[in-house]
Image (cartoon, rainbow, N blue to C red):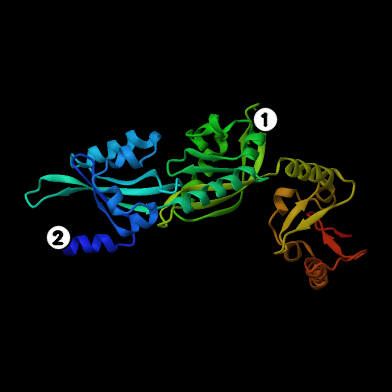
């Protein structure tokens, strides 16, 4: 049985090593040999920590082995190994207590995974995020900031050191939007992503800025949800321009109305109100043609709107409107 066990370990497609209670190597499979470059003859009976672990990780790796030698196993511990050629490789380790037939602890077996490529990819991903020309932030499953790129820093004024580990919603969102932003984050943490969500952020200087956000679920290699990444767009200037545009429309000395793609009123300025007698509250979201156009002109006005909704505009089209007082006015 032990020979079969040893054969399985030696031929496994993951690096596996083991140490005795003194920390000396007593298991070193072929995959470990291929990964690190040392043959089993070169490592057997050598102290793993002292001879093969980089100085800054000696204490941490020794602590993991000591815990396993006391029956406390560790999963997903990251640490570097130096290859025979002097290259540094990153390893993700599960350290398992090894026992004899009587249950006595006789050592530790470590099953590793080479994550050098993954970490390099993550660093490249982090670099791309950090240098992107859009504000990008991320939170963990508890809503604490763990991504904050340079553009976010310039936009909001807080450095990454000032925001990392802090609650995004509790500390950086205005009171009137805390519940809404928390809902978007909660949905993303359940896998339901959100596009084009508008919300305000307060800068370090106390200025309110408007942000358009896409909230994306963040997952690990196994597909487990580990947080949310938000890619934003500063729309403060755009909204200010839209407000100015609305103000100009509202105060224009000509009646101006607008409809959405369903023909429902969404623009109704003061001059239109004075002309027809209906306030904006009375017409907003109502169907313009069905409710405010005389029967004999419904088809013609609907045709003009349909053409405009297909990009074909109309000039100097005459039609009647019925005022609130029941008077017909020609427009």
Q: Nearer the viewer, mark 1 or mark 2?
A: 2
**Could you say which quadrant of the image residue 224 lies in?**
bottom left
Rounded to the nearest angstrom, the CA distance separating label 1 from label 2 is 69 Å
Report whether 132 appears left or right of 63. right
Element at label 2 = helix
Element at label 1 = loop
User: What percent of the width, then of the height, locates residue 325?
Assistant: 80, 54
Q: Residue furthest top?
A: 205
Q: Residue at x 71, y 60 (%)?
A: 264
Q: Residue furthest left?
A: 102
Report whether 183 appears left or right of 322. left
Q: Is residue 278 above or below residue 296?
A: above
Q: Residue furthest front?
A: 41
Question: Quick one: label 1, few (<14), some, or many (20+) residues within 10 Å?
Answer: few
Question: Quick one: label 2, few (<14), some, or many (20+) residues within 10 Å?
Answer: few
User: What percent of the width, then of the height, locates residue 168?
Assistant: 52, 37
Where residue 255 is drawn, which disc sits there? none
Quarter of the rendering occupied by the N terminus: bottom left
Taking depth in this image into account, of 331 and 3 the one nearest to the observer is: 3
Where residue 2 is drawn, which disc sits there? 2
Quarter of the rendering occupied by the C terminus: bottom right
Q: Which residue is mark 1?
A: 207
């Amino acid at each position: 049985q032990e020979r079969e066990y040893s054969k399985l370990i030696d031929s496994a497609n993951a690096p596996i090593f083991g140490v005795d209670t003194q920390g000396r190597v007593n298991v070193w499979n072929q995959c470990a040999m291929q990964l690190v470059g040392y043959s089993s003859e070169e490592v057997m009976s050598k102290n793993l920590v002292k001879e093969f672990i980089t100085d800054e990780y000696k204490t941490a790796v020794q602590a993991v082995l000591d815990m396993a030698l006391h029956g406390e196993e560790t999963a997903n511990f990251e640490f570097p190994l130096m290859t025979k050629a002097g290259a540094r490789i990153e390893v993700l380790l599960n350290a398992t207590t090894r026992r004899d037939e009587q249950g006595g602890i006789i050592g530790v077996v470590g099953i590793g995974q080479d994550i050098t490529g993954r970490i390099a990819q993550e660093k490249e991903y982090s670099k791309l995020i950090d240098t992107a020309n859009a504000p990008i932030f991320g939170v963990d499953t508890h809503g604490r900031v763990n991504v904050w790129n340079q553009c976010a820093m310039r936009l909001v004024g807080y450095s990454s050191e000032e925001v990392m580990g802090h609650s995004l919603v509790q500390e950086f969102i205005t009171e009137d939007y805390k519940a809404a932003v928390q809902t978007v984050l909660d949905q993303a943490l359940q896998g339901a992503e959100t596009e084009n969500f508008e919300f305000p952020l307060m800068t370090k200087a106390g200025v309110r800025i408007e942000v358009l956000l896409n909230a994306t679920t963040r997952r690990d290699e196994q597909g487990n949800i580990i947080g949310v990444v938000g890619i934003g767009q500063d729309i403060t200037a755009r909204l200010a321009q839209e407000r100015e545009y609305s103000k100009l429309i509202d105060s224009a000395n000509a009646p101006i109305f607008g409809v959405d793609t369903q023909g429902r009123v969404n623009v109704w300025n003061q001059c239109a109100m004075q002309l027809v007698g209906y306030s904006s509250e009375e017409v907003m979201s109502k169907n313009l043609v069905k409710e405010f156009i005389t029967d004999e002109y419904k088809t013609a006005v609907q045709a003009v709107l349909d053409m405009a909704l297909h990009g074909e505009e109309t000039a100097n089209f005459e039609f009647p409107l019925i005022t609130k007082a029941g008077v017909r006015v020609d427009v």
